[in-house]
Image (tube, rainbow, N blue to C red):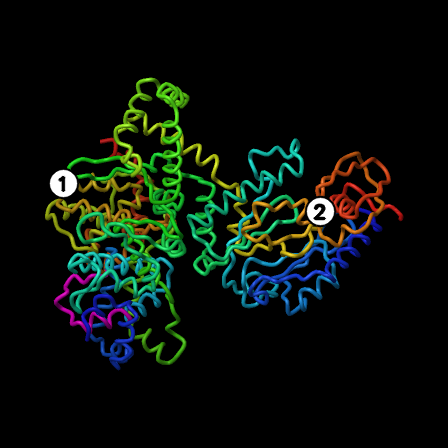
Amino acid sequence: MNPLHARYPFFDGAREAVEASGVALPTLIADDAPAVARGRERVERALLSGTTESETPREWSTQDELLSYPIARILVSLIDAPAAVRKYAAAEAATAADHFAEDFSSTDDGLKSTNQRTVSLDDVLREFDLADDVIAEPPERGRDPDWFRVALGSYLTLSNADWGDGWRLVNREVVDGAVRVERADLTRLLREAVERRVADGLPFQVRGTAGGDAIADSLESEIGTLRDLLADRRDVRQIDTVAPDLFPPCMSHLLDRVRRDNELDAHSTFALTAFLTGIGMDTDEVVQFYRDTTLDEETIRYQTEYLRDDTGAQFAAPTCATMQAYGDCVNKDERCETIAHPMSYYEKALDEADDVREWREA
Amino acid sequence: MDARTREYLKGRFGDYYRRAVVTPPPDADAREWGYIPWTAGAGTTMVRHESLLNLGHIGDFLAREAPRHAYFSAARYTDPSANAMSDKDWRSADLVFDLDADHIPAIDPEGTSYKGMLTACKQSLLSLLDILEDDFAFEELEIVFSGGRGYHVHVRDEGVRELDSEARREIVDYIRAIDLDVDGLVRTRASGPTTQRVLRTEGGWGKRTHDRLLAFVDELQSMTEEEALERLQELDGIGEGRATTILGAFERNPQAIETGNVEAGGPGLRMLVEALAHEVVEDQTAPIDEPVTTDLRRLIRLPGSLHGGTGFEVQRIERDAVDEFDPLVDAVPDRFTGREIRIDAAEQGTVDLLGERTNIEPGVNTVRECVGVFLMARGDAEKAKE
């Protein structure tokens, strides 16, 4: 088993390795093999944290890691939501981009790989059929090239004008059919290439055959949990009032814990941040709100940005059912009996309150 | 247009097509075809969603139908004759540019003669080709006189055929310098412990601005110091002090300017660069019509066909013939030059074709056939009885 394939499971070679391994995914799933757990982690981490890196990398063998990728693709297909595909592909790409950065800097000149465990820039360009389309300029000093020329068609295909004015073709040095980019920009383009490859073919039809139905049935509980992470979207009335006194008990509890214990697991931080975002707080406000805690500002910023997707819609906070499942539903009061969502609790509380103390005016 | 005129033009278009050799575009079988027939009334009905399978050999079809206008799609489809766009299965499309006198900002359509419009359009065509060839290095270019008031360029390079609409818009914006960040043409580069401001000289609008700057420096060097200082002070925001600093920088360190280093000339030099950038944009952009380029399913006039609004040939132009090309001579079909016909003109006017000026009086005139066809096609005359 080539560790490189586990590191870059979307490479063509990795897919071939999975096929050549003779491992049958249905068997793996039926046996609830470690690769299935790792596959679920891949998707879960993708949806919650924007990465597919494992939190417990030592737990998994190279083979688990490699096989978890096709499993994750099955899971994402079964979730069957455009946002799931988008966020999963983006997370695989972000993770790959981190790996590229490590690998490129560990290779001597960034151009040739020195061992089997890392890739070189040339390897990646070849993988994405870009070898002829990306030419390094001779470096001004040192050995690593700083500038590259990307063929016009490839540049326009991979880049996106929405990334900023600097990406607009009109603001680029275009010469002889190629666009000049710096190393960091090239990495951004490669990340996009990964994202597209991962998203390609997703979601696919899993059910419909006896084998497919069996897979889908075995994964039902995983899908339920994952879908909850995502599908806790609902039409939320536009709220733009921050009144901590009126927060539902679960959120007040999480807030207490984060302030007192300075520690929350990922699910709980996500739930609280999603709630705060949902009631109209922007990133800076959320950061401000957490200022007395040890929560890492970068993480909060990332999470808040991430909670808004491209369409402007947001991930709503988890439902009461999900809060219960994670053991975060505590101190239920009378109002809790009348609602199924922490946001509904807060809406009602706002409606019924005589005097609302706005945190932002404190 | 009355029935006699319509019949006449249709008949003569048919005569033209029976002799003409119309070379279809590459992958003709994968294109959608369309045409506008000679029908009565003001409304024009385009027949589209046709494939060569339906129409047959394109030359035979044109000779038989003698349409008023003929088009093919920039796109290639799996099933070009499917009626719904979504069923055609789009595969790729030529990158098409359209220059039309209507869209050239410097031209007032009311006050400019047809000839004047075509001349201005040719200038824009040359600017466009300059960018397509130098910056983009496209190799498979087909340049076409539209038969009306402008030019089309079809680009068929492999690398751009599959670009989506947004990517094509980026190309349009580049050519028109839309949203160009003029301040961004100068970037800050680390140079040891300090930083330097340098023009982006390797390509794009930065390089074009740099080329202009070098030409400007040459211009100044051919002057006396007094003249040079005066020339600089013609620019907005540059007074005597800044002009002296700029000139000093040019003299002390000409290599710096050569490499795009604009640090030494102070803020005055950066203002000069900005002014030159605006001039370059003014002179070198081409006012292409955006929707034509970004529409992946557009129908474009077929080269070799006749334009029903002028009677001119929609004509391919070899690259090295562009400079010399004169649409009012070269696009006039030979078929319509051999005899004279009688037409009934509505108003007085003049027509310049084939290097001859024809004066038209209201009422019946006897004119060279191409002049008559031109006026009838434009709706300025009807066919008179011979």
Main secondary structure found in the magenta portion: helix
- Identify the element where label 1 is drawn: loop
- Identify the element where label 2 is drawn: loop
Chain letter of the residue beneath label 2 in the structure image: B
Q: Name the residue under label 1.
A: A292
- In terms of image quadrants, where is residue B190? top left
* Residue A136 coordinates in the image, percent (x, y): 28, 55
Chain letter of the residue beneath label 1 in the structure image: A
Task: Give the farthest residue toward the left.
Answer: A261
Mark 1: give few (<14), some (14-19) or many (20+) Cα within 10 Å: few
- Residue situated in front as seen by the camera: A117 or B361: B361
* Residue B39 coordinates in the image, percent (x, y): 77, 53
- Residue situated in front as seen by the camera: B115 or A279: B115
- In terms of image quadrants, where is residue A125? bottom left
Q: Name the residue under label 2.
A: B310
Indicate which disc residue B8 carries.
Answer: none
Please say if B279 is above or below A238: above
Mark 2: give few (<14), some (14-19) or many (20+) Cα within 10 Å: many
Q: Give the range drawn in magenta.
A: A52-70
- Residue situated in front as seen by the camera: A91 or B208: B208
Q: Are discs 1 and 2 both within one chain? A: no
Magenta segment includes A59: yes
* Residue B52 coordinates in the image, percent (x, y): 64, 67
Left or right of A293 on screen, residue B348: right
